[in-house]
Image (cartoon, grey):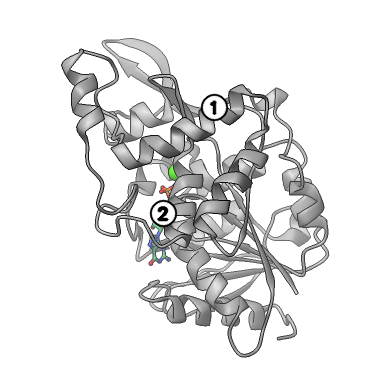
Amino acid sequence: MRITVLAGGVGGAKFLRGVRHFASSNGRSDEVTAIVNTGDDVTMHGLRICPDLDSVMYTLGGVIDTERGWGRAGETWRIKESLAEYGAEPTWFGLGDLDIATHLVRTQMLEAGYPLSDVTAALGQRWQPGVQLLPMSDDRCETHVVVEIDGARRAIHFQEWWVRYRAGLPALAFVQVGLDQAKPAAGVLEVIAGTDLLLIAPSNPVVSIDTILNVAGIREAVLAAPGPVVGLSPIIGGAPVRGMADACLPVIGVETSAQGVGRFYGARAAQGILDGWLVHTEDTAVVDGVAVLARDLYMSSDAETAAMVADAAALVGFDL
Ligand code: GDP
Ligand code: CA
């Protein structure tokens, strides 16, 4: 069977560990592909940085710093310190010494003309994620946040809003710069068109999942996917499990609840993306045209997460 997952960074990465576990358990040998958000990508100090792809790659490669949630375990920060001593901006972004090696290889390959999808595959040679990783697009399509600073409206890069301001500056809107030129990365539409089961990771609905869906053709491909589509709620009891997704949903007028997100995604029968929607045990959701299941959604271990995947599949009658 072919399983495809739309994923952001930390939540997506944790979920993918569970999907990988599911795909090789009980004698299964499913092929798993992750289509990962690249709206967070940014260039700093001349380095091309892909935070969500790296979170997924390091997590699946077993080298993520689990406490910090991003970057490599055993990281050191000497280059960052040295850049700060030069007064080189920005100083607010975490760039670890080990991590910089990844960005150097990526930047060099991109400058040599390789598309990001090829670069991602090459980096994966080292970490063997066990899952095919595809960026949503090979083209630049960076999320910006419209904010007011000193009385003036400005669009700042998503990373500046998220990391520097800890999502504390009220956001007026999210804008994907480059969206009108961006095409899905090589392979993305083909993978969706050939998938037996499509899963929407419990990732940030606004700046991870919707960002992917907005790339020309991807939402339409999901709508036309041959297999069922099931999503998992990142919102438990009216708040994100981790992170600041609650700073994003109100900006687009969506209630921070499992039901709010489910309705935002909508039923495929009504031009949305879902056939099934998993919410946490104490949550409820009524979404027209979507089968809803309440179960534990804390991804406490790969086996637990794999059990969520099995339930998601069963919910939409996917033949296990
Ligand atoms: P980011 O790109 O690093 O922000 O990560 P994602 O967009 O992939 O995921 C962020 C979301 O993951 C947050 O909204 C969290 O609520 C969600 N999340 C993290 N851990 C869990 C978990 O154990 N269960 C569920 N249901 N959601 C989780
Ligand atoms: Ca992200």
Going by the numbered disc 2, the residue's amino acid type is Val
**Helix, strand or loop at disc 2?**
helix
**Helix, strand or loop at disc 1?**
helix
Of circles 1 and 2, the one toward us is: 1
Quadrant, the C terminus: bottom right
Going by the numbered disc 1, the residue's amino acid type is Gln
Report which residue position mark 1 lands on: 108
Label 1: how many residues lie within 10 Å, few (<14), some (14-19) or many (20+)? some
State the residue in front, 283 or 229: 229
Lower position in the chain sequence, tag 1 or tag 2: 2
State the residue in front, 219 or 188: 188
Kindly tell me whether residue 120 is visible in this rendering.
yes
Kindly identify the residue that appears in the image at 46 percent across and 60 percent down: 61
Spatial separation of the CA atoms under disc 1 and disc 2: 26 Å
Residue 59 against residue 285 in the figure, above or below:
above
Kindly identify the residue that appears in the image at 56 percent across and 68 percent down: 286
List x then y, in percent, for residue 142: 54, 28
Q: Is residue 300 left or right of residue 316?
A: left
Report which residue position mark 2 lands on: 10
Residue 195 against residue 295 in the figure, above or below:
above
